[in-house]
Image: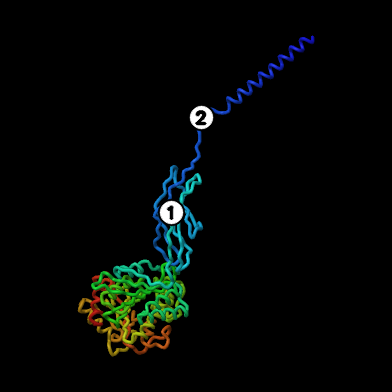
Amino acid sequence: MLGLKIELLKIHKVIIATTYILLFVFSCSSGGSDDGPTTTADTIKPTVPTNLTSSQTTETSTMLSWNTSTDNVGVKDYSVFKDDTVIGTSVSTSYTATGLTSGTSYSFKIRASDNAGNISGFSNTINVTTTSNNQLQTASGDIENYIGNIIDNAPSSGGDDYSAPSNSQLEVCNDIINAILADDINLAVTKSGEIGYQITEFTDTSLSPNKIFYIVEKKAQTSNFWGTYVFNKTPDRGDLVIMAPHSKYDTNTGKEAIYCFKNTLARAVFINGTHRCNSGDLSSCSGTTSACGTSEPFRISDMAHTTTSMFQSVTKTVFNSVSSSVFIQLHGFSKQASDPYVIMSNGTRETPTTDYATLIKDALLLEDNSLTFKLAHIDTNWTRLIGFTNTQGRFINNSSDACNTSATSTSGRFVHIEQEKSKLRDNAADWNKMSNALKSVFN
């Protein structure tokens, strides 16, 4: 019996030992095989982005561009550094840095990263200085194209983009124009920055010899749609000022105005900044119109019928500073069967010593003898579209209250011209008739 127990114990030990060996072998054999797939970590960095440059720099932004990086798997994005601090990322090879300060220098550099977190070295570093409030802008080309683009992109009807300038802003407007008339361009540049405007020295290379114009225009990033005012540095007709207060409503009158300005080499041209119906707010000045729908008071965005405007302020400044200046205001109308092709007025029923309206009429007839006319100071029973509520005309004719009181006597320095489209406004060939007439009268 004892012997049997001893044998059984030996067998048990053998079983345990055998089991242990089998388990050991199994565990070793199940630990993996060289025949299975392996994964290698991505440790390769993207190449360094190159040729970092900047363009379209303004007072508050600049556009950065660079050449693409390459990577064995693929570039994820680029980190943009301003003065050694990350300001953003881009999945493309450009980035616009915004929120910058006017007249300030910044350094920029770029580096690329991939999905594995590998980061390239830095690109070249560039230094960029934003433009200043007090910096003269320069441009060249054809003044017609330049101003035409401003007209095309001006806000249209009903957008409420227009807001009236404050009295202090209008005082700055006066300072800007007086500085330009005195050829103190540095002062004009300084003052224009105070109201979100700039001075652009424009060289018209389409004229021979080239001519220089100074453009008082809003900065691209501001919303002061108060109009654009162009002054000729060396005018041939220093008394002639051309105005287009409804360039977005009276078809082509703005482009006609700049065409006439360029081809007569007049002293200045004034172009309004928005459609006359852009603002929903009503002017306090007298008179009504149905131009914006039903009959109502004029809107504050209607430059011919409000006195709290840059358009009115610039008119007053030039009128007072250039004693012989004459203001020709171009309008357009839809001709009714009983209407002539042209309706002209000096803003009153009086005949001035120098009757520019009649002189322009006679000159236009030499250009196109099919034109017909009504002149408010000669055809005194005519009442349609004679401009007696025009606030620039009222001021120029010495009204005691340009906002609410029509003038009773004429200074002879304002001519309001309503033009039917097909004869005078349709295209450059038509505009040339007006340009030639003005050349003849203001020779």
Amino acid type at circle 2 is: Gly
The answer for how far apart the CA atoms under marks 1 and 2 are is 41 Å
Q: Secondary structure at mark 1?
A: loop
Binning the other alpha carbons within 10 Å of mark 1 as few (below 14), some (14 to 19) or many (20 upward) gives many
What is the total number of numbered labels drawn onto the structure image?
A: 2
Quarter-of-image position of residue 288: bottom left
Mark 2 lies on a secondary structure that is: loop
Q: Is residue 390 visible?
A: no
The residue that label 1 is drawn on is 123
Label 1 vs 2, first from the N-terminus: 2
Mark 1: which amino acid?
Ser
- Residue at image coords 21%, 77%: 367
Image height check: is 256 above or below 39? below
Q: Position of residue 130 (x, y in %)?
A: 43, 66
Q: Is residue 7 visible?
A: yes
Q: Which residue is mark 2?
A: 36
Query: From the viewer's perspective, is residue 140 above or below residue 313?
Result: above
Residue 201 image point, x, y percent? 34, 72
Identify the residue at horizontal 66%, vertical 18% (top origin).
18
Percent coordinates x, y for residue 356 in the rendering:
27, 84
Q: Nearer the viewer, mark 1 or mark 2?
A: 1
Q: Looking at the picture, tell me which residue is in the foreground, 24 or 312.
A: 24
Query: Which quadrant of the figure contains the C terminus?
Result: bottom left
Position of residue 367 relative to residue 121, above or below, is below
Image quarter in which the N terminus is found? top right
The residue most toward the right is 1
Quadrant hosting residue 275: bottom left
Depth check: give the residue in front, 98 or 241: 98
